[in-house]
């Protein structure tokens, strides 16, 4: 149940981040756009970290591995550690 809540909060985080590029087209003044964008960034970060906390460390490791870039795609992480 806790993991489900974590995934829902992560989905909410993605939705919040996707709302940021939409805000300028809603017809607000420049000052209001800046304030709304700042609020969305803060809310997106808070919901992301809260979701990660609820889902667990395993999911965080999967996210980190997904964003990691390897120098040589044919190398495995164990191979690159041996060569150093």
Image (tube, grey):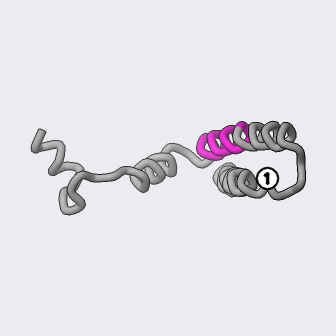
Q: Residue 64's spot in the image, x, y percent?
A: 43, 48
Q: 24 and 11: which one is in front? A: 24
Q: Quadrant of the N terminus?
A: bottom right
Q: 40 and 3: which one is in front? A: 40
Task: Check if residue 57 falls in the magenta segment.
Answer: no
Report which quarter residue 36 is drawn in. top right
Q: Residue at x 51, y 51 (%)?
A: 59
Q: Residue 28's spot in the image, x, y percent?
A: 89, 48
Q: Residue at x 82, y 44 (%)?
A: 33
**Image height of 29 relative to 70, above or below:** above
Query: What is the residue that sits farthest to the right in this orientation?
Result: 28
Horizontal arrangement in the rendering, residue 25 relative to residue 8 (left or right): right
Judge whether residue 8 can be spotted in this image.
no
**Image height of 15 relative to 35, above or below:** below
Report which quarter residue 27 is drawn in. bottom right
Judge whether residue 46 can be spotted in this image.
yes
Q: Residue 17's spot in the image, x, y percent?
A: 68, 51
Horizontal arrangement in the rendering, residue 24 relative to residue 7 (left or right): right
State the extent of the magenta-drawn residues as a range.
42-53
Q: Quadrant of the C terminus?
A: top left
Q: Residue at x 70, y 41 (%)?
A: 41
Q: Main secondary structure of the magenta part?
A: helix
- For label 1, the crowd category at 10 Å Cα-Cα, with few meaning under 14, some 14 to 19 and many 20 or more, is some
Report which quarter residue 42 is drawn in. top right
Q: Residue 50's spot in the image, x, y percent?
A: 66, 40
Query: What is the residue that sits farthest to the bottom in this orientation?
Result: 74
Q: What residue sits right under mark 1 in the picture?
A: 24
Q: Residue at x 75, y 37 (%)?
A: 38
Query: What is the residue that sits farthest to the left in this orientation?
Result: 83
Q: Secondary structure at mark 1?
A: helix
**Circle count:** 1
């Amino acid at each position: 149940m806790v993991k489900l809540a974590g995934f829902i909060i992560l989905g909410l985080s993605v939705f919040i981040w996707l709302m940021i590029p939409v805000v300028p087209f809603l017809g607000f003044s420049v000052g209001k756009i800046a304030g709304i964008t700042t609020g969305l960034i803060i809310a997106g970060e808070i919901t992301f970290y809260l979701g990660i906390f609820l889902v667990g460390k395993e999911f965080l490791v999967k996210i980190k591995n997904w964003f990691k870039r390897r120098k040589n795609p044919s190398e495995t992480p164990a191979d690159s550690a041996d060569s150093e």
